[in-house]
Amino acid sequence: MNRMTETSREYAEALFLLTKESGMEQQALKDLRFVEELFKANPDYQLLLVSPAIPMSERSQALENALSGAILDPVLCFLRLFCEKGHISELSSCIEIFNDLCEESQKTTTAYVTSVVPLTDEEQGILKAKLEAMSGHRVRLDCTLDPSILGGVVVNMDGNVLDGSLRRRLTEMKEVMER
């Protein structure tokens, strides 16, 4: 594990433990995602927070002014500390680790589903039920579209890939025919 990931994990775990104690971890995750979107929409803001030309006290005050009252106090304190320690550029990595900790604590996992056409609500329900039965966890579907799979569905969950795509089936048929 590289040093940045290690640092992100340490901070994410500390914030998770703090917010879990009071049952605020899901709200903290929403707040972190809100801040992440804010930074994506305003990239100059994150540059301001890492600029050595601006005194740290002014950078901390900028965070306070922008986010006080909009997010949980523990999340704001976490962001100030993260900024003061020079790690704000690792925020996205930290948020993903925090998300994983939330999912793990709820026995929830995310299944990344790729299909050619959008799955109907009924199809998503059936797929979700099958994946929950397989994994023994609650499953959240994250669906994307990719026409290159030609048909069927590819599911990536907990490091396992279930490839039911037409592209894979055609590749297997080709291999059998070439033997």
Image: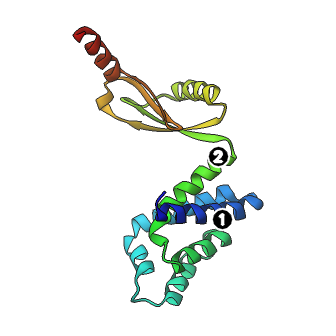
Q: CA distance from mark 2 to mark 1?
A: 15 Å
Relative to 70, does residue 125 appear above or below in the rendering? above
Across and down, in percent, residue 37 comes to: 46, 62
Across and down, in percent, residue 154 comes to: 42, 29
- Three-letter residue code for mark 1: Ala
Residue at image coords 29%, 10%: 176
Q: Residues within 10 Å of mark 2 (few under 14, many from 20)?
A: few
Q: Kindly state the secondary structure of the residue where label 2 is placed.
A: helix
Q: Residues within 10 Å of mark 1 (few under 14, many from 20)?
A: some
Which sits in the foreground, 175 or 78?
175
Which sits in the foreground, 58 or 109?
109
Residue at image coords 22%, 11%: 178
Q: Quadrant of the C terminus?
A: top left
Residue that protrudes farthest toward the right in the picture: 22
Relative to 8, does residue 125 appear above or below in the rendering? above
Disc 1 target residue: 14
The figure's colour scheme reads rainbow
Reading the chain from its start, which is encountered first: label 2 or label 1? 1
Q: How many marks?
A: 2
Residue at image coords 77%, 60%: 21
Q: Kindly state the secondary structure of the residue where label 1 is placed.
A: helix
Relative to 158, does residue 20 appear above or below in the rendering? below
